[in-house]
Amino acid sequence: MKERTIWNETRSLLVTYNFKDENDIKGFRKALDKQLNQSTVDRVIIIVNVPRGVDKTKLSPHFLIYYNAPSDYTWLGKLKDLQLKNELKRTFDLMLSFGKIPRKIERYLNKMEISRKILVNAELTNDPSYELELNSASEDPSEIVNFVIETLHKIDINES
């Protein structure tokens, strides 16, 4: 019988990731795809936070990725991307946040029904909504993803 760990019990996954450059995103996506192919996760979305000055229309499209840029919000802070807005109304078993989440999207994420939130490689937030804060010594996206998944494989669902 399989152990009841956080990762083994995850069926729906929301991932946030901060854009550095195109190669970084490709490495991250490849590592995550490899882990997802060996998992029980059947629904996933990835929100890639793109900084001002980066043209998200020139980034490689992927059916799981929503590129989230400052221009995706009205001056009142309302999200313009209706497809992403609808995705954010769904529930998720697990949210993995790689790096600090921009405040505009964080407002939407905080309103969502998410069973477990885990922060990876970000400053300590003291936010009680995060069950766990992990820090990887590596900067390599594939090593970070592997570290997080290996850690989640070790944590019993009843301990968290």
Image (cartoon, rainbow, N blue to C red):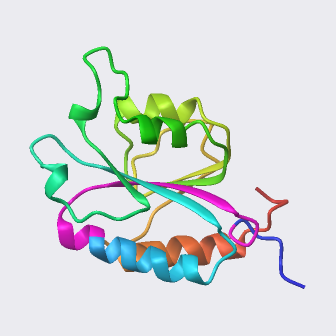
Whether residue 11 is visible: yes
Q: Nearer the viewer, residue 63 or 45?
A: 63
Q: Residue at x 61, y 73 (%)?
A: 151
Whether residue 138 is visible: no
Q: Residue at x 40, y 63 (%)?
A: 63
57 falls in the magenta region:
no
Q: Nearer the viewer, residue 46 or 135?
A: 46
Q: Quadrant of residue 138?
A: bottom left
In this rendering, is residue 2 above or below 29? below
Q: Quadrant of the N terminus?
A: bottom right
Q: Residue furthest right?
A: 1
Position in image of residue 27 (x %, y %): 31, 77
Q: Residue at x 61, y 35 (%)?
A: 112
Q: Nearer the viewer, residue 48 or 3?
A: 48
**Residues drawn in magenta:** 7-25
21 falls in the magenta region:
yes
Relative side of 100 to 117, left or right: left
Q: Quadrant of residue 71?
A: top left
Relative side of 11 to 146, left or right: right
Q: Quadrant of residue 40?
A: bottom right
